[in-house]
Amino acid sequence: MRNHTSWRAGGIAERVYRPADLADLAFFLHTLPTHEPVVALGLGSNLLVRDGGLRGTVLLLHAALTEMHMETSESVYVQAGISGTKIARFTAKHNLLGAEFFAGIPGTLGGMLAMNAGCYGNETWKVVKNVQTITRSGKLLERAPADYEIGYRHVALKNKNIYSGDHSLPVQNSLFQEEFFVGATLHFISGDGAKVRNEIKSLLSRRIASQPLNLPNAGSVFRNPPGDYAARLIEQCGLKGYQIGNAQVSEKHANFIVNTGGATATDIETLINRVQTIVQNKTGITLLPEVRIIGDYKNNHG
């Protein structure tokens, strides 16, 4: 899985499947045993796979669910494998405002829907008109935002004890998911495409200047606590540059953990836990991970 996650760490998956398209994905899911664990994966950001690897099947959607087209003059249909940067550029090309922030999110739409990803004061579900999901049996459904509980880095189906999507489960939760996001219709407003493109360039420049994009990372590791910033708290505790094995709290942005070369998933998870403990002890604030941690510990697979 190190080849399919942005941290470049992690063990071996039992099975992987890259569907040809949505119809192929539906057929494949229909053939799987109902007890089969399934993980849907886009760019593999916001995810840590333990060194013992994964049981079940990993769906590689980034190069599969890549359809994107205008539905109306102010709405766009986007499949789950499309990256945030492509969404931002496509809408700018069609003179639409409101998707600029997607350029700052290092993931695909499926993961962004599943965790209500956001940056620079905007969140994914603010522009969602409706979503398309697929069940474990391969059935396609259309759902409205009203069908979900939507919060800060949290999305769940109402009145059901399940989560929807590839990155919505909290740390160490089950892989037995009932539905996956496969697409959405996003609504924007008409505007000046040239101004939008300039704004996208500005956001990308800010991202390059403030984030350690030269080293493998998974984006922000911790959620921001109410009224504060995880990065500020971590830095306040003197943890910039703190290292376990080859995993390091970034010296450029304290809410990033970078792989300095050959870090194991155990290095990264141990560092996450250590940062949590130190911040809790020094500030009394519990940092909640934004990243999803899945899989078996090493020597505990099989």
Image (cartoon, rainbow, N blue to C red):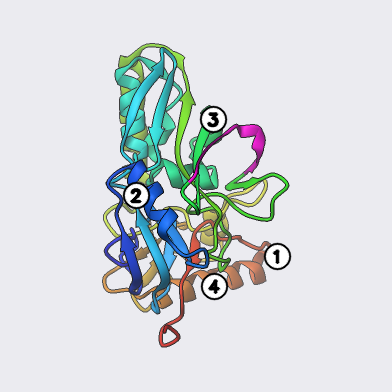
Mark toward the viewer: 1 or 3: 3
* Three-letter code for the amino acid on which mark 3 is drawn: Asn
* Three-letter code for the amino acid on which mark 1 is drawn: Gly
Mark toward the viewer: 4 or 1: 4
Q: Secondary structure at mark 4?
A: helix
Q: Position of residue 134 (x, y in %)?
A: 48, 45
Seen at 46% across and 49% down, the residue is 138
Q: CA distance from mark 4 to mark 1?
A: 15 Å
Whether tag 4 and tag 1 are in contact, CB under 8 A, the answer is: no
* Three-letter code for the amino acid on which mark 4 is drawn: Asn
Q: Secondary structure at mark 1?
A: loop
Question: Residue 178 or 26: which is nearer the viewer?
Answer: 26
Q: CA distance from mark 2 to mark 4?
A: 30 Å
Whether tag 3 and tag 2 are in contact, CB under 8 A, the answer is: no
The residue wearing badge 2 is 61
Q: Position of residue 253 (x, y in %)?
A: 42, 54
Asked if residue 14 is positioned above or below residue 69 in the image, the reply reads: below
- Magenta-drawn segment: 139-151
Q: CA distance from mark 3 to mark 2?
A: 20 Å
The residue wearing badge 3 is 130
Asked if residue 226 is positioned above or below residue 66 in the image, the reply reads: below
The residue wearing badge 1 is 284
Q: Secondary structure at mark 2?
A: loop
The residue wearing badge 4 is 273
